[in-house]
Image (cartoon, rainbow, N blue to C red):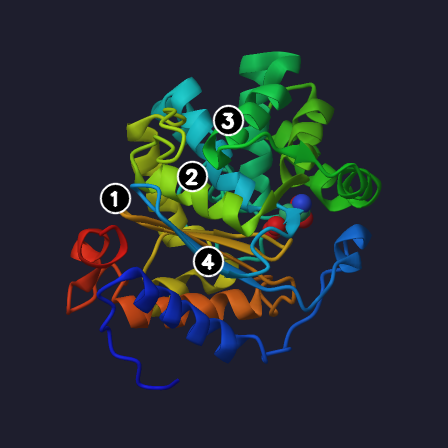
Amino acid sequence: MDNLEITAQKSSDIHHVLQHIYDTVKDNHKGTLPDYIPELAKVDPDKYGLAIVTNKGSIYSVGDVETTFTIQSVSKALNYCIALELLGRDVVIGSVGVEPSGDRFNAIEFDPRTLLPYNPMVNAGAITIAGLIYDHLGDEAYEFILDRFSKAAGRPLQLNEDVYKSELLTGHRNRAIGHLLLSTQAIKEPVDKALDLYFRQCSISVSTLDLAVMGATFANLGQNPITGIQVFDMTSIRNTLSVMFTCGMYDSSGFWAHDVGLPAKSGVGGGILGIVNRQLGIATYSPLLDINGNSVRGIESFRMLSDEFGLHAFDSTNRGSGLVSHFFDH
Ligand code: GLU
């Protein structure tokens, strides 16, 4: 990329950097639309948006940031945070591990030492988390999580009925995982309710801006910086960001931690949510996916953002630590 040093001193400079990233990345047409959930293949492959929201509520964006898409696996991070709050760390850790799996997100694999799902960011772990939440809240569970997701985004969100039906019709692998989890007693009956909650949570519609506000809510210790509503419990956020850091980007979580250095979660709907702790929520949307199931343009955008603004958690320049006060919020 061009040598755009960090010279951002005011918001127009930040917009300039975002526009530069957008212009560079938008010509990348690599990747494919997922078709194992047929409805996901019906989206416009050219859509691309990039948004940043600070923990004080300033918004920076470029591209198609209001186009909606389904949240898919990004929901796993939010539900993990909710489950930790509702049930406590010990119950949750007793049901789902926190180790990277090294397997595909929908692998039918469990940790051989514990017989539990490896982590809450793969399908087996997320279905278990959905089961725990259903067990705790019963038939109110979906409305409860939809309300939390909406509060995190700062606006009422809705289910994409077509994607939900498509998941119901084609989610045989997830059903198989659910029944195996039942056989190992990681989840309880009714397994169909846990699966239904999982299919619904994945089918909630969001925009890039929604995801960035959700990220800023995480970054702001659980309080939505725009509405001022406390959405998530602070301690649960710490644990959630840790698992996102190590397991959030499917089979390229290691590369992501190495090159981008942020807690993040991607979804096969094409969204990626990243967080700069205590500072920023960052989101990208572009539906063409790489072989790991991550958005191609999303990965490239985050790499550039991390480099441009020094956001990597272990960046030697430490620019990330003072970013908000110095660049984004004056
Ligand atoms: N609903 C999708 C599935 O279960 C989510 C996968 C993802 O985004 O990784 O396969």
Tell whether circle 2 marks a residue whose Cβ is less than 8 angstroms from ligand 1. Answer: no
Q: Please name which of the two marks, 2 or 1, marks the residue nearer to the observer.
A: 1
| Residue, disc 2 | 97
Q: Which amino acid does label 2 sit on?
A: Gly
Q: Which amino acid does label 4 sit on?
A: Ser
| Residue, disc 3 | 148
- The answer to the question of whether label 4 and label 3 lie on touching residues, with beta carbons closer than 8 A, is no
Q: Residue furthest right?
A: 169
The secondary element bearing badge 4 is classed as strand
Query: Who comes first in sequence, dot 4 or dot 2?
Result: 4
Measuring 31% from the left and 60% from the top, which residue is drawn there? 11
- The answer to the question of whether label 3 and label 2 lie on touching residues, with beta carbons closer than 8 A, is no
One can see residue 127 in this view: yes
Q: In this view, does 328 lie above or below 277?
A: below
Query: Who comes first in sequence, dot 1 or dot 4?
Result: 4
The secondary element bearing badge 2 is classed as loop
Q: What residue type is labelled 3?
A: Arg
| Residue, disc 1 | 278
- The answer to the question of whether label 4 and label 2 lie on touching residues, with beta carbons closer than 8 A, is no
Q: Please name which of the two marks, 1 or 4, marks the residue nearer to the observer.
A: 4
